[in-house]
Each structure stands twice: as C-alpha cells, then as structure tokens.
Amino acid sequence: MSFELFIAGRYLRSRQKLRFISLITFLSVAGVTLGVMALIVVIAVMAGFESDLKKRILGVDPHIVLERTDRQFTDYEGISRRLRSIEGVTSATPFIATQTMLRSDAGIAGSVVRGIDPDGDGPVIPGQDGAVLSGLRVRVAEGEQRGAGLPGIVLGRELASSLGVIEGDILYLISPRGMISPVGHMPAMKRFRVAGLFETGMYEYDGSLAFIHLAEAQHLMRMGRTVSGIELRVTDIYRAGKIADGILTDLGAPYAAKDWMEMNRNFFSALKLEKTMMFILLTLIVLVAAFNISSSLIMMVMEKTRDIAILKTMGATDASVRRIFVFKGVAVGLFGTLLGGGLGVLLCFLLKRYEFVKLPSDVYYITTLPVQLEWPMVALISLSTLLISLVATLYPAGQAARLNPVEALRHG
C-alpha cells in the first residue's frame, strides 16, 4: 500500500477535532447513497413502464407494415408467401384498416376497423390482470358460426361500453364507401354480432379499435381483391428496421415499409426524453452531496495544515499530497455509491418480488409498479457518481498541494 492511501485511510477513520467536518462527511455519504438509490429505482420503474407499454403496443400493432404507394395491393398472397421465407419473419398476413361508424341500439361511435385473416397469427393483447388474449382472429372467424349467419366482430372493451353492447349483441357497421342511389350517396351498412371483447389497458386501442374478417372488410369497403397492406411479425423486434430495409431493397417501388419504431417514434422519443430528464434531475442530489465532499475536504485541509507542512518537509511531493485528499474524497463517494447501489438494487428486487406498492386501477392500466432493472444503467449511474465525486476533490486537493510548508509551520 502506498503511503498516500495509508494516510488517506487514517484521515478517513480518525476523529476530527472539529465534529462539524465529520458531520459533513456523514451527510456527503448519505447524499451520495440517497442519490444513487433514487436514480436506480426511478430509472428501473420508468424502464418497466416503457417495456410494458412496448409489449401492449406490439400486441396490437404489427412489427412491420408493408404497403403500396398506389393503394393497389392485389398480389398480397404471393407477396405474403415470399415474406414468410425471409429469415427472422414469423408471420406475414394481409389486413385492411379503415375508419367507420358503429351503431347499436344504445349508441353510436366512430371506430378504426381492421379486417384480418383468420388463418394468420393473431395479435397477443395483455389484459389489465396480466392475462393474455390470443387467437383473436379465430374468434372473428367463429363469430359467424355462433351468430346465426351474422359475421363476427371483436371490440375493445371501452368501445363496447360506449356502444352499450356485450358479447352476443348485434350492431351495425356503417362504411362511408357506399353506392350512388337516386337520392344520392348511400353509405354501406351491415349487421355484425359481437364475437368477443379485448382489453389492452390503453384507451387509444380499447376505445376505438375493432376487428372483423378480411373478406367482410373487402366486401364492405368494395375493395374486391385489394388489401391495405401486409403486417409482419419478427422474432427480434429490434431488427425490424433492418428487415424492413431488406424487404424494400428486394421488392423496390411502389412498395413502402415501416417498422414499429418508426410508426411510434414520437411516443417512444417522449419516453426517452422523460427518462433522460429524470436522470438529470435526480443527479442533482448527487451534486449536492459532491459539494459536501468538497466542503469537508476544504475544512480538513485547513485543519491539517501542520500535517501537510510536515509531510512536505519530510519529502512528500505536491502530487503525493494531492493524491491523499483525492483518495479520501473518492473513498467517500465510493462508499456512498456502493451503499446506494446495493440499497437501490435491493429495493427494485423487493418491488418486483412482493409488489407492495399498489396503483389505483381506475387511474392506471396496471395495478403495481413495473420494475425492470437495467444493469448497464446501474453501471452508468455508479460511474457517473464516482466521476462527480472525483471532480469534487480536485479543488481542495489542489489547494493542499500548493500549500507552502514554511508559511504553514510559521502560522500553524
């Protein structure tokens, strides 16, 4: 062990003549601990919210959407088979998306209706209770069998509530694409039986989305053998952009492809900005603790003036004296970082394991705090805290190194 580390350790363990310095050192450790713990817990909770929202969004929306710019997508069957052969693509199914009106005996509401292929892979929609509603397309296909000749429709729970319908009820779907009659333009209208309800916990989907059979959507919209596009799902959602680029390179014009990150760019950019701002704001706690570290070192330099002068007369260099106080300040920051990191990780584990923080179900779409501990973020928080602690020691350590031993012994 170098003598700088030995002396720094002695200074750290010894009782100060001025108890005020010891109090500031204690507050410095407490501040670093609190800041690191708060950063780890808050970032883990925000990462959990982001992950949960991502799962819910991708349960409804496809990973990649392939469309034609001329809106004449008639060769979708051959294209779908071609896309399924691409490595990383798990499904490629045609769809139709359009805005319509839904009318029941109790009310009327606007809706985004998606015509889906019953033979394809259905969306996976997490419910508020954690259950997963899958096979949605099968339920649409079975709606006609259970509905005495009426085609089936699957509604979001909030949309069904606004229409005043439950499973098994009959409603009318009104499309703006109708026909010209002697009295003018007549919208197309058809009866459907509610085959099922789904709930994602996100009002954007639950309050406006409905699913019907692809063939029914083609007939109602008078689209013939045309579809809006093909929705793809992939094994690795973070490679969706590269896969979409490869598809466009292979197919060329007039095709256009968007991945889920591009379709939800504003939403996830807002989440990322919020996460960054929380990191910056909570880092202020660590900065306050760093000022305490700097203050305690400045006062220690003033108290240990004679000690520093004696060390210099015995041959200690300015760099050695500087390292003594840097080591002491970094040790305070390191201890607080380790303690805060341990408490933060422990609290995240307890929150995830026992779920003792409950959220009101009538306000939030989840009942407990979602926690997803990201070890790279834990490492970033720890390294940032140590760097701040190191910077806080430079000024007082520099003052100690520049101390004149003659003047210190004369006036000390």
Image (tube, rainbow, N blue to C red):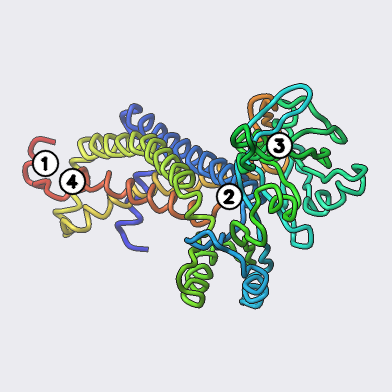
Which residue carries the number 1 mark? Answer: 408
- Residue displayed at 37% across by 40% down: 280
Q: Number of numbered discs present?
A: 4
Which numbered disc, 2 or 1, marks the residue that appears first in the sequence?
2
- Residue displayed at 68% across by 36% down: 174
Which residue carries the number 3 mark? Answer: 355
Image quarter (top left, top right, bottom left or bottom right) of the N terminus = bottom left
- Measured Cα–Cα span from mark 3 to mark 1: 59 Å
Which residue carries the number 4 mark? Answer: 400
Q: Secondary structure at mark 2?
A: loop
Classed neighbour count for the residue bearing mark 4: other residues with Cα under 10 Å, few (<14), some (14–19), many (≥20): many
Q: Are marks 3 and 1 in contact (CB under 8 Å)?
A: no
The answer to whether 19 is drawn above or below residue 128 in the figure is above
Q: Secondary structure at mark 4?
A: helix
Residue 404 position within the rendered picture, expressed as x and y whole percent measured from the top left: 8, 47
Which numbered disc, 4 or 3, marks the residue that appears first in the sequence?
3
- Quick check: 1 left or right of 205? left
Q: Which mark is residue 373?
A: 2
- Quick check: 191 left or right of 243? right
- Measured Cα–Cα span from mark 2 to mark 4: 41 Å
Q: Are marks 4 and 3 in contact (CB under 8 Å)?
A: no
What kind of residue is marked 3?
A: Glu
